[in-house]
Amino acid sequence: MATRDLTIPGERHPEKAHRADKAQPKKPDWIRVKAPVSEGYKQTRDILRTNKLVTVCEEAGCPNVGECWSQGHATMMIMGEICTRGCTFCNVATGRPDALDTFEPGRVAHAVQTLGLKHVVITSVDRDDLEDGGAEHFAQTIRAVRHRSPDTTIEILTPDFLKCPPSALEKVVEAKPDVFNHNLETVPGLYPTVRPGARYFHSLRLLQKVKELDPAMFTKSGIMVGLGEDRQGVLQVMDDMRSADVDFLTIGQYLQPTPKHHAVERFVTPDEFKAFEKSAFGKGFLMVSATPLTRSSYHAGDDFARLRAAREKKLGLV
């Protein structure tokens, strides 16, 4: 059997090939970014290539890749580049993944040390083919980074472990990441069309369970806007997250990767993002990042420092 060529849209997203094309509207001025050309960008790219690592920066087509990589920041994507889910917003390839690479945790740890990262974000594809959803692989990667770079803070962005026993989440929490992030992605009413393989209240419960397992662990979640939600729906998601004691909220503009993906219903203005930020802080989040270009790991290191400072202030430690 020939190897799939993930540069070909039909092979990258076979589950979307039959979908009718949806117009991609012109991006407003506040969303445009410069092409990545800096020396720092090239150095980061070379380190990642040398260690044979996949990043969500490239796989998901993040608009901030030039800025982040130029500063030596990258979000490592473990467990391969093929996801078992077919979310309509996502540009990560869909299909049957390869077996786990037992040497990957060590390579991630080596790259973190080589890049000299003070804060690293580690995410993954969904691995519904694995009994534990890849939880042990996450834990091994966290431990490997801790061993090589003990002063580096670790943020993970996990799948939902929907089909896994409770022990899967427990394994990941026991490995003690500094921040546990799991994105709700959108309002519950849009899940059937945007995130069909997931369940809103399961994801919400996952975040709540992390706090029950380790009350001191920071939790984080994010959504995209511009998919067809309304303002009241976004505010309700904020309330749901706060009921699960989520500390950090991110909100960013959805950008359509290809004509086969979910359409951009509208571009949310910077003023609307500022209003979301104000509302979120009013609801009790310790940290909020709400801008058109916000992504889960955008400025994650700086935001983590602010998150920790906000908790210390709340507890009267400063």
Image: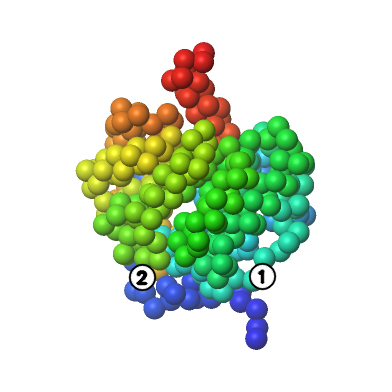
Relative placement, left or right, of 152 versus 84 is: right
Mark 2, Cα crowd under 10 Å, few <14 / some 14-19 / many 20+, is some
Of the two numbered discs 1 and 2 on the same chain, state the one appearing first in sequence.
2
- What amino acid is at disc 2? Asp
Marks 1, 2: nearer the viewer: 1
Q: Residue at x 56, y 46 (%)?
A: 173
The residue lying toward the viewer, choosing from 113 and 101, is 101
**Residue 146 screen position, x and y as percent:** 71, 40
The residue lying toward the viewer, choosing from 309 and 232, is 309
The residue lying toward the viewer, choosing from 162 and 26, is 162
Q: Residue furthest bottom?
A: 1
Q: Residue at x 60, y 41 (%)?
A: 177
The residues bearing labels 1 and 2 have C-alpha atoms spaced at a distance of 33 Å
- What amino acid is at disc 1? Ala
| Marker disc for residue 99 | 1
- Is residue 155 visible in the rendered structure shown here? yes
**Residue 275 screen position, x and y as percent:** 29, 32
